[in-house]
Image (cartoon, rainbow, N blue to C red):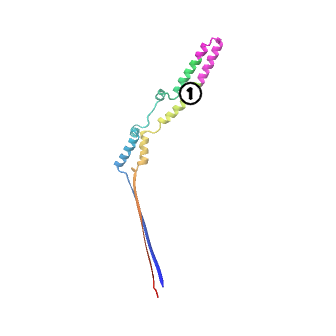
């Protein structure tokens, strides 16, 4: 007669915890982000979004300034050609000047409408994120001062087998 039996036992455990960041850890995190942004994060957090004026943007050719200068040059060239053409009568010169002026005004109106749209966008940008907004964002994301978490787990298994027999 023979027989065998076995026994097995296993267990596992897991642990997890979290805690707020310390003031030093938050300061270190901010310092690193400020460093990576070339100091712009600190500047933004103390001054907010820079308020650009249309004049500042137009000074570097923005808000249609380049296109308007090009339009002025094109108009002057067209008028110079009309004036310099000896084959045109006075009536033809007046009509050519009138058509040139009309084309100039139509194009200038289109540019002006685009500029107004861009100024509206600029106003929305300038009304964008302020230093108060950054404080609000910081409170939302770091209201609990951030978190550090730690977890670990493990398992253990044990088995035992035995067999035996009685012989005759």
> Is 137 or 42 nearer to us in this picture?
42
Q: Residue furthest front?
A: 168
Task: Classify 11 as above or below 19.
Answer: below
Magenta-drawn stretch, dominant element (helix, strand or loop): helix
Residue at the spot of label 1: 111
Residue 83 counted in the magenta span: yes
Q: Residue furthest bottom?
A: 168
Task: Give the residue displayed 63% in from the left and 14% down from the top.
Answer: 93
Percent across and percent down for residue 133 are: 44, 41
Helix, strand or loop at label 1? It is: helix
Residue 52 counted in the magenta span: no
> Is 128 or 162 nearer to us in this picture?
162
Task: Give the residue displayed 60% in from the left and 13% down from the top.
Answer: 84
Task: Give the residue displayed 63% in from the left and 17% down from the top.
Answer: 96
Task: Classify 2 as above or below 147.
Answer: below
Task: Classify 144 as above or below 82.
Answer: below
The answer to whether residue 15 is visible is: no
Percent across and percent down for residue 69 are: 53, 23
Task: Classify 79 as above or below 154.
Answer: above
Task: Give the residue displayed 56% in from the left and 29% down from the top.
Answer: 113
- Report the number of discs: 1
The answer to whether residue 150 is visible is: yes
Percent across and percent down for residue 106 are: 60, 24
Percent across and percent down for residue 39 are: 38, 39
Q: Residues within 10 Å of mark 1 (few under 14, many from 20)?
A: some
The magenta stretch spans which residues? 79-106
**Residue 42 quadrant:** top left
């Amino acid at each position: 007669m023979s027989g065998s039996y076995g026994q097995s036992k296993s267990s596992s455990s897991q642990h997890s915890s979290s805690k707020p960041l310390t003031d030093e850890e938050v300061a270190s995190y901010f310092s690193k982000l400020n460093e990576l942004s070339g100091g712009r994060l600190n500047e933004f957090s103390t001054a907010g979004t820079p308020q650009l004026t249309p004049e500042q943007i137009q000074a570097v050719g923005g808000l249609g300034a380049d296109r308007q200068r090009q339009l002025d040059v094109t108009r002057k060239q067209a008028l110079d050609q009309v004036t310099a053409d000896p084959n045109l009568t006075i009536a033809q010169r007046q009509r050519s000047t009138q058509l040139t002026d009309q084309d100039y005004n139509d194009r200038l109106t289109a540019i002006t409408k685009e500029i107004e749209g861009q100024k509206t966008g600029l106003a929305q940008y300038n009304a964008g994120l302020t230093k108060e907004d950054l404080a609000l964002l910081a409170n939302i994301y770091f209201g609990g001062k951030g978190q550090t978490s730690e977890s670990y787990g493990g398992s253990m298994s044990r088995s035992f087998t035995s067999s035996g027999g009685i012989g005759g």
